[in-house]
Amino acid sequence: MYIGSHMSIAGGLHKAFERIRAVDGTALQIFTRNQRQWKIPPLTDEMVEDFKAAWRDWGDYPVAAHDSYLINLASPKKDAVEKSLAAFTEELRRCERLGIPWLVTHPGSHLGKGVDEGIRRYVENLDEAIRQSETGDVTVLLETTAGQGSNLGSSFEELARIIEASAFPDRLGVCYDTCHTFAAGYDIRTPEAYAETMDRFDATVGIDRLRFFHLNDSKTPLGSNKDRHDHIGKGELGKEAFRNIVNDERFRDVGMSLETDKGDDLEEDRMNLAVLRELMD
């Protein structure tokens, strides 16, 4: 099972591999740049070479990138969409140049315009970004969301609608966030509940589209629609929910990343990864 964490790129993109190795992780998620800014610095040949060399030294393990939280391709605001489209296009190009196969993204927020209009705008702008990027090797992973406010993607049905409406369905997959889906009302705490939820995902989206996991416990209860990550086994999901995931043979080759709070010493990551490993049969 490939399990790891989201790691900082402070000091250089390649530094993320030093950090994931420090916790013995076998899956990694990063931002490819400062995700709090619209301005995107160019990738130099040296940065790309250092990143790829560090990846080779770490091992043949899965790496995903997460796009900036500023991006909202479903926005009805012209200025926001223009910035979002340019930023997401560049995120795709950066991933392709770095050799990262997965770009995780939140499906955007309709900002009061309704789900139907939000999905229409999102798909239109997502497709345009893929076209403009002129990339071919990066798969966009739509992240399951908690259902806060006007955010899209909190139901499997909404994710399926996006994929079906896109001109590039073969370029789309899903990143399953355990905290978000639980907050959205999908239970995985017992073997029976887990099987029912995964069967529903398979029937709606297709289990083969699930390409990455975010492993986060939830500080809030089932159906709360609140995105509040907690450490593994410390929240409302509990350890057994994660036992169901890490022992599912269908996901043996799927990368799984923590997104829980931690200090610079990464001790919380070591603690959470130790819990996950203890749950493996």
Image: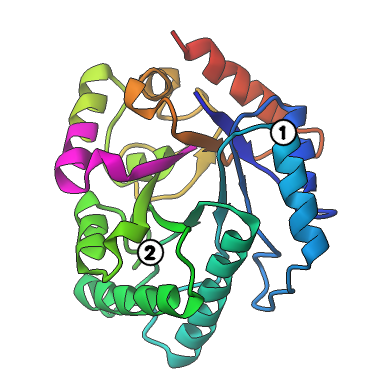
Label 2, residues with CA under 10 Å away: few <14, some 14-19, many ≥20: many
**Magenta run includes residue 211:** yes
Residue 67, given in percent of the width and then of the height, sits at 55, 62
Q: Disc 1, disc 2: CB below 8 Å?
A: no
Which residues are the magenta region?
Answer: 198-215
| Mark seen at residue 107 | 2
Most extreme residue toward the right is 11
Q: Secondary structure at mark 2?
A: loop
Alpha carbons under labels 1 and 2: distance apart: 31 Å
Q: Amino acid at mark 1?
A: Trp
Q: Amino acid at mark 2?
A: Pro
Position of 120 relative to 226 (above/below):
below
Magenta run includes residue 178: no
Helix, strand or loop at label 1? It is helix
Residue 67 located left or right of residue 201: right
Where is residue 16 shown, x and y percent of the image?
A: 74, 44
